[in-house]
Amino acid sequence: MPSSLLFLLKKTVSVVLLPPTSPLLMAVLGLLLMRRYRRTGTALAATGVLTLYALCLPALAGWLERTTYYSGPAQPLTGAGAIVVLGAGTADNLVDYDGQTVNGWALERVRAGARLAKESGLPVLVSGGVVWDGRPEGELMREAMSEFGVDVRWVESASRDTADNATLSAAMLRDAGITRVALVTHAMHMRRSMEEFRRAGLDPVAAPTMIRRPATWSFSDFVPSSRALQQSGWALHEWLGWLAQRLRPQVPSP
């Protein structure tokens, strides 16, 4: 199967399985079945609506996010030859920024990478390609990194997912004689990213950003919000990606 078709299939399956699509489809299916199978249809519809409601609660969203965190031992940056900052998407069709720039998620990673670069003095590689159209995310990340006063040494601009980030970045770094790297991404994305970079033959050191503390519950944590639904979706996306990674055969790194 062509890689572009496989990528499209993967994205389609992800959209169908993740919220809000999956609970909405369950609710709609339940409503369609209610005329002939009242109990089954009612149960499905109620389950879909209640699931969507629960995923909108900040209390559940925060718990889901913390279940995705990388639990490996903290390691020093000793011996690391570079910092790798992973992309997270772009904001498009903008009046400013010449129409396109990194999105908020990617900017959080860029900021963390810039701070680490200033603290450590290590050179930086940014990784992100073109998912559908527009400019490569890696180029946009380099521009954003310069706003924080950090020059980027390597730009990987052909990747479309985390596995590509690892494989293509590893090839560039091996050419520079570097195998140990500080890996910068969100805390909820770190576990899967560490495994991909290990599979690519690198020795990554986790440098996560946006690590949430355990919650101290308040009334607002049980009030539905669109932000909590997005947070739940990202957490479940990581679990789905982790499962897919576990099922994917591991190809020996060069």
Image (cartoon, rainbow, N blue to C red):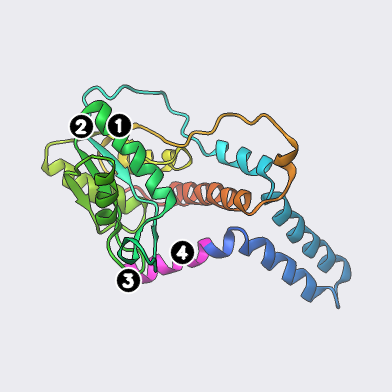
Real-space CA distance between mark 4 and mark 1, rounded to the nearest whole angstrom: 32 Å
Examine the rendering and report whether any part of residue 230 can be seen. Answer: yes
19 or 101: nearer the viewer? 101
Is there CB contact under 8 Å for labels 4 and 1? no
Q: Which residue is mark 2?
A: 122
Whichever of callouts 3 and 4 sits on the residue coming sooner in the sequence is: 3
What residue lies at 22% left-to-right and 29% top-to-bottom? 80
Q: Give residue 161's position: percent from left, percent from top.
A: 36, 55
Q: Amino acid at mark 2?
A: Leu
Q: Residue furthest front?
A: 96
Mark 1, residues whose alpha carbon is within 10 Å: few (<14), some, or many (≥20)? some
Determine whether, in the image, residue 66 is placed left or right of residue 4.
right
Q: Which residue is mark 4?
A: 11
Mark 2, residues whose alpha carbon is within 10 Å: few (<14), some, or many (≥20)? some
Whichever of callouts 2 and 3 sits on the residue coming sooner in the sequence is: 3
Q: Quadrant of the C terminus?
A: top left
Is there CB contact under 8 Å for labels 1 and 2? yes
Real-space CA distance between mark 2 and mark 3, rounded to the nearest whole angstrom: 38 Å
